[in-house]
Amino acid sequence: MSVKRINSGHGHRYTIDGARAEGVTTVLAMINKDLTRWAAGVVADYVIRYPELTAQMVRSDPGGARQFLTNLPVSTRNAAATRGTIVHRDGDRIAHGEEVEVADEYLPFVLSYVDFLNLYRPTIIQTEMGVASRAYGHGGTTDGIMEFPPDLRLYDGSLHPLAGLRALFDVKTGKYLWEKDVLQVTAYRFSDTCVVDGEEREMPEVDVVILIHVRDNGFEVVPVTANLLQYQAFVALVRAFRALRAAGMEINGNGLKGTPDLLLEPYPDPRSED
């Protein structure tokens, strides 16, 4: 038996020895980011950037315009997830001397990631690695593990804090980093097994966990506190997630959704004959 990632439609799920495993990012959907202002900002930015097009949509199809603007934050979020995958994949290939055709919308991010690879000179140990915990039944896919050269130095000639260290890393291309990103990479770090080239292996040890925050005009390498305390918090979320499902409730990107038998028909109104 083994750990498997099963792609289905627009999503995927994980199994461990044939049994359902909770996806790390699915569990973390329980923690809603404060996206109200962000979503409003996405719509406002679009209207400011494309005022004539927006006005034309409203005049020709008000209902369609409303639906488009309502869905804009979701499509923007999904595009950011796709962008992260493309940046990581194409940046690695370019850094290894391959010729890669990159869409214009992704090119500034890919070039920023290539700058990181050229400046920090990491050796990529594993990439897009499936990880899982048999102990707590969760699975996920980490961007990988890299090792920094022992002679990595700062501008003043002193050793860089990452010199010679092995890091579990995740590439983020959104506007912000979030606290739930900490729990995500912590869950990956404390997984007990991984899948490499189709074979299951013991999860390798790392010295540090980092987020590589790639933007269209640069990047930052952000160390993460991913210790046992943070992992215990994530495990508590896994247990809460399962308790909610047992109670007839599921977590998705839109929040909490219950089965039809949770909210029943109203009691009869005493003032009515019906």
Image: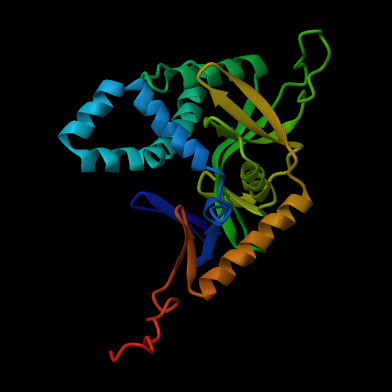
User: Which quadrant of the structure image shows residue 155?
Assistant: top right
Is 194 above or below relative to 221?
below
Q: How many marks?
A: 0
Relative height, residue 58 to residue 216 (above, below): below
Seen from this angle, which residue lies furthest bottom? 273
Q: Nearer the viewer, residue 194 or 227?
A: 227
- Foreground: 264 or 193? 264
Q: How is the image coloured?
A: rainbow
Q: Is residue 32 left or right of residue 40?
A: right
With 70 as the anchor, is 187 left or right in this view?
A: right
Of the 4 image quadrants, the one containing the C terminus is bottom left
Q: Do we see residue 85 in this rendering?
A: no
Q: Residue furthest front?
A: 271
Closer-to-camera residue (46/93): 46
Image location (x, y in percent) of residue 121: 65, 19
Specify the farthest residue to the left: 60
Q: Residue furthest right?
A: 158
- Relative to 211, is 113 on the left or the right? left
Q: Is residue 274 visible?
A: yes
The residue at 52%/42% (across/down) is: 35
Q: Position of residue 128 (x, y in %)?
A: 53, 39
At a point 43% along the width and 18% down the height, the residue shown is 107
Picture coordinates of residue 2 (x, y %)? 54, 60
x then y, percent, for residue 197: 52, 44
Nearest the camera: 42 or 121? 42
